[in-house]
Image (cartoon, helix red, strand yellow):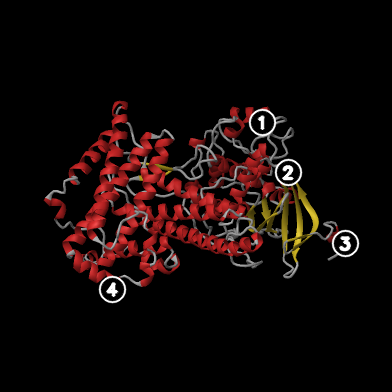
């Protein structure tokens, strides 16, 4: 391999042989390395765990778990994460062109066409981070790597997330690093959101087209004072006349001191300066070949191959009900949804009273009247398939086309499905799992002292119980109990019968209408009592805006998914299985059930967000299956070792 490779002392890390050192930081050393079989060059970042406290180490592992889901030509790819007793090795894509800082130092000021080329690629990478609700926080030319030494190489965002954990606690004494590209709100030690990345983008663009930094200073304080003293971004006179107005506008829109006045991400992605030009030499981003360096498991502590995914698009977009937040309060709140139409306390108390009127414990005659279902046959199919997804009967992937179906079919077909015993069985089983998960979450919020959040969740739980009562009504109205039992014995496949032990409602025979109806009625009454007790404690606090229950459920699902990823990396199989299962359950509830519940305000989900959630569920499902397999593999090993 040559003398230079001997500098790495030929150490082997997994399937890689370390070569020369190509970088170092406070807690890490970066080595150039090669795959021992394929010969593919990679960069291996060696992190000393002894230098990291437990909080930083756990946070780093969490970021690694998230980054494994990102695969994009403008983001440095994480191939593997290898953990030993005292080290963490990150196997990263190797970029032979160095970084953008060296490029600028060699070439100086660049043309607008070249600057546009880099900005488009940077925007493309940032868009993926935005879709995953992630903030870089340390964008600078040193962290933007280049695929080659050509004039217009592929730009890749590097060191994402790790800067948060691997940087020294204090700022550098000299301004050779991040402070020159750092947003003023970070300098002020204020809470900040994702727009800090846009300030950094503006500083990089300004440096590309002028050859100079937008603001400088001999000290950190002086730099900040210069930013405060600037009312409008000033360009060098010898450069200003050569710049297109769109370029000037983009720089000034990005480098606004107040985040609320700064350009929004969507406006940046669609800015005129980044639009294709009829003339000029602007170069589009191009993809690079992905080399398979191991097995195909998407999340493994020793072999990682990121899956191409659009993931969650800055959270969920709730049509007429809520919208995505444009900024985050802090990096800890990576996924934030801001409801547009909060229900007032008066509305929610009214909803609670309506629930009681509609479902009396004395079983009024109206309870036995047949009700018209809201959903279409396509939605019914989705619900039935979701049961299989959660119970593990079939792979989620095989249901993709059905789950994404939004077609409306005739009422007659809907009635046929709603009178099917199999339909009643699967729907009620699924609803029992939903109410269990929602009740657990509501109680968790109550124990945390979050009464408003708990009350909002309890109202959603009541809506699910009402749906269960409606299904019971349809079942009883469609057949006699004897006919249903005789039919169900033939209707339910053997694999469905095998999963009856998964019923969360213990002691309930889901094949027997009378048993299920009693369970649903009792469950509704208990849920109503809980909600009424909470509401009594809230009556004196005024007409407040209530938290959005769907946002709470969505946040909890994402937190559970990330927790499962951390547990999987750490080898905690049972914890990973529990967290992944909970995340799948809650996301399925949002995608499948919530859109048909009689909520106030009505909850709706655009098709694009529905598809993103489905892809996320599929990804979680693959990790859940893998964790199950790993747990089964571990058992024989543990048994043999105990002997």
Q: Is the C terminus in the top left, top right, bottom left or bottom right quadrant?
A: bottom right
In front: mark 3 or mark 2? 2
Quarter of the image where one finds residue 541: top left
x then y, percent, for residue 620: 49, 58
Q: Depth check: 162 or 142 in front?
A: 162
Q: Is residue 496 above or below residue 312?
A: below
In front: mark 3 or mark 4? 4
Q: Are marks 4 and 2 in contact (CB under 8 Å)?
A: no
What residue is disc 1 on? 223
> As drawn, is 260 to the left or to the right of 377?
right
Q: Earlier in the sequence, mark 3 or mark 1?
A: 3
What residue is disc 4 on? 490
- Say which mark, if any, is on residue 50: 2
Q: Earlier in the sequence, mark 4 or mark 1?
A: 1
Q: CA distance from mark 4 to mark 2?
A: 62 Å
Q: Is residue 482 above or below residue 70?
A: below
- Say which mark, if any, is on residue 547: none
Q: Residues within 10 Å of mark 3 (few under 14, many from 20)?
A: few
Q: CA distance from mark 4 to mark 1?
A: 77 Å
Q: Depth check: 112 or 164 in front?
A: 164
């Amino acid at each position: 391999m040559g003398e230079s490779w001997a500098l790495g002392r030929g150490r082997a890390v997994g399937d890689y042989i370390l070569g020369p050192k190509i970088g170092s930081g406070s807690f890490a050393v970066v080595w150039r390395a090669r795959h021992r079989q394929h010969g593919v060059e990679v960069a291996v970042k060696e992190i000393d765990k002894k230098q990291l406290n437990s909080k930083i180490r756990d946070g780093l592992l969490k970021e690694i778990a998230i980054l494994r889901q990102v695969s994009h030509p403008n983001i440095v790819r994480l191939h593997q994460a290898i953990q030993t007793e005292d080290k963490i090795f990150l196997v990263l894509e190797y970029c032979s062109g160095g970084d953008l800082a060296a490029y600028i130092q060699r070439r100086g000021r660049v043309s607008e066409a070249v600057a546009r080329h880099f900005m488009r690629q940077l925007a493309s990478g940032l868009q993926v981070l935005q879709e995953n609700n992630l903030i870089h926080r340390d964008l600078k030319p040193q962290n933007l790597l280049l695929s080659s030494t050509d004039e217009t190489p592929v730009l890749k965002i590097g060191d994402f997330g790790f800067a948060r954990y691997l940087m020294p606690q204090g700022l550098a004494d000299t301004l050779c690093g991040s402070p020159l590209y750092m947003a003023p709100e970070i300098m002020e030690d204020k809470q900040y959101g994702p727009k800090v990345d846009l300030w950094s983008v503006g500083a990089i663009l300004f440096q590309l087209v002028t050859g100079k930094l937008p603001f400088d200073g001999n000290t950190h304080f002086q730099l900040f004072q210069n930013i405060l003293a600037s009312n409008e971004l000033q360009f060098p006179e010898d450069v200003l006349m050569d710049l297109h107005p769109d370029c000037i506008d983009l720089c000034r829109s990005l480098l606004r001191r107040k985040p609320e006045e700064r350009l929004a991400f969507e406006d940046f992605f669609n800015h005129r300066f980044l639009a294709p030009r009829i003339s000029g030499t602007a170069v589009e981003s191009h993809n690079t070949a992905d080399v398979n360096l191991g097995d195909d498991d998407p999340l493994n502590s020793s072999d990682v191959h990121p899956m191409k995914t659009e993931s969650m698009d800055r959270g969920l977009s709730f049509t007429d009900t809520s919208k995505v937040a444009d900024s985050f309060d802090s990096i800890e709140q990576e996924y934030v949804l801001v409801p547009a139409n909060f229900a007032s306390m008066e509305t929610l108390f009214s909803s609670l009273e309506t629930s009681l009127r509609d479902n009396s414990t004395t079983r009024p005659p109206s309870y036995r009247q047949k009700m018209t279902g809201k959903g279409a046959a396509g939605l019914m199919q989705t619900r039935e398939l979701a049961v299989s997804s959660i119970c593990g009967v079939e792979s989620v992937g095989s249901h993709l086309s059905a789950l994404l179906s939004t077609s409306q079919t005739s009422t007659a077909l809907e009635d046929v499905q709603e009178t099917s015993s199999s339909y009643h069985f699967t729907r009620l089983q699924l609803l029992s799992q939903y109410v269990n998960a929602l009740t657990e979450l509501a109680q968790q919020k109550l124990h945390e002292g979050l009464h408003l959040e708990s009350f909002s969740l309890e109202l959603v739980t009541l809506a699910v119980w009402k749906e269960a009562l409606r299904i019971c009504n349809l079942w009883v109205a469609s057949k006699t109990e004897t006919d249903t039992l005789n039919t169900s014995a033939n209707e339910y496949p053997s694999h469905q019968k095998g999963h009856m032990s998964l019923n969360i409602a213990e002691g309930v025979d889901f094949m027997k209408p009378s048993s299920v109806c009693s369970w649903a009625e009792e469950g509704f009454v208990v849920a109503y009592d809980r909600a009424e007790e909470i509401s009594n404690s809230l009556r004196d606090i005024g007409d407040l805006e209530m938290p959005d229950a769907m946002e709470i459920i969505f946040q909890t699902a994402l937190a559970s998914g990330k927790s499962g990823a951390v547990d999987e990396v750490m080898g905690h199989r049972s914890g990973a299985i529990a967290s992944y299962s909970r995340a799948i359950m809650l996301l399925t509830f949002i995608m499948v059930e919530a859109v048909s519940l009689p909520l106030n305000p009505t909850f709706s989900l655009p098709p694009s967000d529905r598809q993103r959630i489905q892809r996320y569920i599929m990804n979680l499902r693959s990790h859940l299956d893998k964790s199950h397999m790993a747990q089964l593999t571990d058992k024989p090993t543990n048994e043999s070792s105990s002997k």
